[in-house]
Image: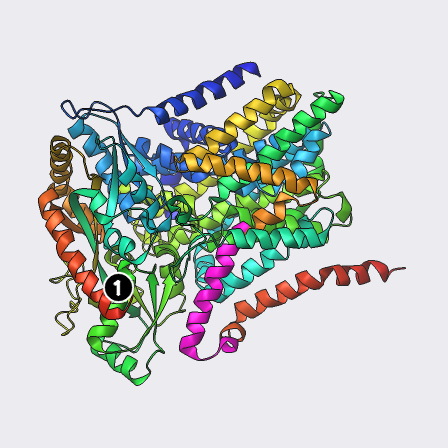
Amino acid sequence: MYRSLKWIFSIVAIMVLTACNQTVDGGGNYPSKPIHYVIPFDAGGQSDIEARRQQPLLRDTLGQEIIIEYRPGGGGAIGWSELAQKKPDGTYIAGINLPHIILQPIAQKDAGYQTEQLKTVAIFQATPIGLAVPKESNLQTIEDFIAAAQKQPGKITIAGSGTYSGHHLAYQQLQNSADINLQYISFTGAATQVQAFLGGNTTAILANSDDLVKHKDRLRILAIGSEERFEPLPDVPTFKEAGLNITASIDRGVAVPADTPQAIVQTLESAFLKIADDSKVQQQMKAEGFEPKSLDARESESYIKEKTLEYQSLLRELGVVAD
Amino acid sequence: MSSVLPEIFASLLDPINIALLITGVAGGILVGALPGLTATMALALMLPFTYSMEADAALIMLGGIYIGAIYGGSIVAILLNTPGTPSSIATTFDGYPLAQTGKAEHALVAAAVSSGIGGVLGGCALLLLSPLLANLALKFGPPEYFWIAVLGLTIIATISTGSIIKGLIGGCLGLLLSTIGIAPVGGESRFTFGFPPLLGGLQLIVIMIGMFCIPEVLNMIERKGQTGKQVSYNPQKGVALTVIKQLFQKPILYLRSAVIGIMVGIIPGAGGNVASLLSYDMTVRFSKQKSSFGKGNIEGVAASEAGNNAEVGGSLVPLLSLGIPGAAPAAVLLGALMMQGIQPGPDLYATSPGLVYTFCWAFIVANLVMFLFGFFGSKYVAQIVTLSTHYLAPLIVFLSVIGSYAIRNHFFDISMMIAFGIAAYILKKVGFEPGPIVLGLILGPIAETGLAQTMLMAQAQGSVWTIFFSRPLSMVLMVFCLLSLLWPLLSHRFTRSPK
């Protein structure tokens, strides 16, 4: 009995000690300690899948253990507001999502962080957002869809994941650029969103490309939010081809606290880009319905700036935020 | 399935796979038994070790961990009145009173047997009924979620020991607490008082640990001060077999709990906690000795554990046949499959039937392994209750702190755990049990999301009534809710008529 208690004590003690291990690192011999890779969502989501893919490869490149931790809540806000407060020594890195890290601080007064408090190291993956209807639906094309929406304003329901999220914004863009009126139904994640749509609860769905690829036998994808045709779904037209000025996607990358020394950022940047540029990794991504990307820290920064301006004007137009 | 039988046998008889299965179950039990460390976390922790394994080996081990963790949660529920994972919440209701009256081993064996039976039934459903159940899962939309949550709330009448009014007030308090954080539909932040850690809402596990654990520790110390008495436990021979014989006379209980567990499992968004609560509730309602529940009725433990372990099999149905995980731990398994280059979904049965069926069979075998662990281990584990309060009280507090921190590595959660623990202690003194409050906290988000989405759907269709009343499943659930509410009147009439 006491022996087993001793075991429990020692296991718990080890857990406490590893959790408390938070000393400062100058940056010169970075990384000298295991790196905590925080996923601000539940396990099993797209960000998690990507981090799991990177984990063994990062360990090989950086020569340190990579510990993946989950800090879900607030659509990612919990994890990001915490990262913003961490010591900028590269021990804590977190997966980031666009447009989330841009939209949350604008739309929520108490998001707990500002976009500028996170320094994006690299952006390595994206899922363009596509519009789909069930296979049995009589809406064959995006034109049919728009015509149907014009005929019955507010009657067509669209399942999306989250509010002030990529899907929510894509829905607003769709309403704006096609001048139609739809009903957005917000779900709490991809699992419930896809399930409700496949169960016939909504007319259409705005979903991430990997979900669309996974369920492609059960649905008809009318248009997708990528700049050019999306490689895993070559037959699907882009919104732009259909004359709608919409690009919509969720980009995933990794960030550190804003004041992190340049040397550490560069070490992480090259490690992540090495994986992102690996052709085997890219092939795997495409097979799963992801779009491989490879933006370094500088490119990510200007990309985020550009997107911020775009979203700000969009939100202002929609009346979500005041001028 | 017959064409891949040789492959299944080869994989299941591989000594390495057998070792992985046993290690997985044992590891799962250990992690599940630590409060705050959930099945999801156990799986996520082990995931990196499976990268280099063959797909079948990885799945066999992860399946074992999932099952073990859900069972492991019952051990601390029985011994320390703390659900080790949210799934074993209803196990505390009768398991802890049993342990307090010297019947810890009875309760532990009942939990092992029932988890095993529930798990095997869930596994059989997974193996034989997957396509059927997957289609049924798709019938559950927002209106049905709402009614399931309402049905769950009617349980308050069952789990309120003492005053029903106080139970209802507790339930309302739980529902109110569940509204803290960003609204699931609409996205406004509510009741956060500008405090970012509250954006994600109250962490269910943290509140549960606090409300169940801390009052118990305080009571323990109080009792010690007053009487100096210690819970006794005298190991007796043959307890395990007696319990098993007793439980095997209750096939209906198991069938009912398993069906509830599987149904809750196949719909994403409701997990093992709902399964355990609903099957506990049903067992109490159909029992002839209602008043013995909550005071140490072994059937209460059996119902809760059979329900939550059947839920495991159920949650894997939509994962394997639709590619949609039915519960949070199943989502980690989805990640594991994708790491192996396997895309779960409708094609999975066609593209890798060997793997799917091997997994289903391994899942059933893992339940038997878990049962053996429980059967032979219970009498040793049961001795924890004889530990002196001097050791036990600090140990429980220690585990509670670690558990609430581990959930998302946040110190804020430890303060929440302690605050809610003290509040629960005071509330208990004035007759408010933690059960209904936690129930409200579990069901609040399901009810709110379901109702808000239904109203949005209704806005598009033009009428709320058509939505609720044009869906057969929604109507069935409404009838269940009504029956559940009127049950005390009905059962009163039934029991009186023979006279």
Judging depth in this view, the residue of B386 and B444 nearest the camera is B444
Rendering coords of residue B16 (x, y %): 37, 27
Residue A38 vertical position relative to residue B225 in the rendered view, above or below:
below
Judging depth in this view, the residue of B474 and A310 nearest the camera is A310
Rendering coords of residue B445 (x, y %): 48, 55
Rendering coords of residue B234 (x, y %): 72, 20
For the residue marked with disc 1, what is the amino acid? Leu
Residue positioned 67% across, 60% down in the render: B484
Asked if residue A181 lies in the magenta stretch, the reply is: no
Q: Residue furthest right?
A: B499
Image coloring type:
rainbow
Residue A21 vertical position relative to residue B208 in the rendered view, above or below:
above
Asked if residue B449 lies in the magenta stretch, the reply is: yes
Q: Residues within 10 Å of mark 1 (few under 14, many from 20)?
A: many
Question: Image quadrant of residue B42?
Answer: top left
Which residue in the structure is indicated by mark 1?
A: A169
Residue positioned 68% across, 51% down in the render: B166
Magenta-drawn segment? B441-466
Question: Image quadrant of residue B58?
Answer: top left
- Left or right, A60 with reference to B495: left
Rendering coords of residue B363 (x, y %): 46, 40
Residue B120 visible at all: no
Q: Residue furthest top?
A: A3
Label 1: chain letter: A
Judging depth in this view, the residue of B6 and B261 nearest the camera is B261
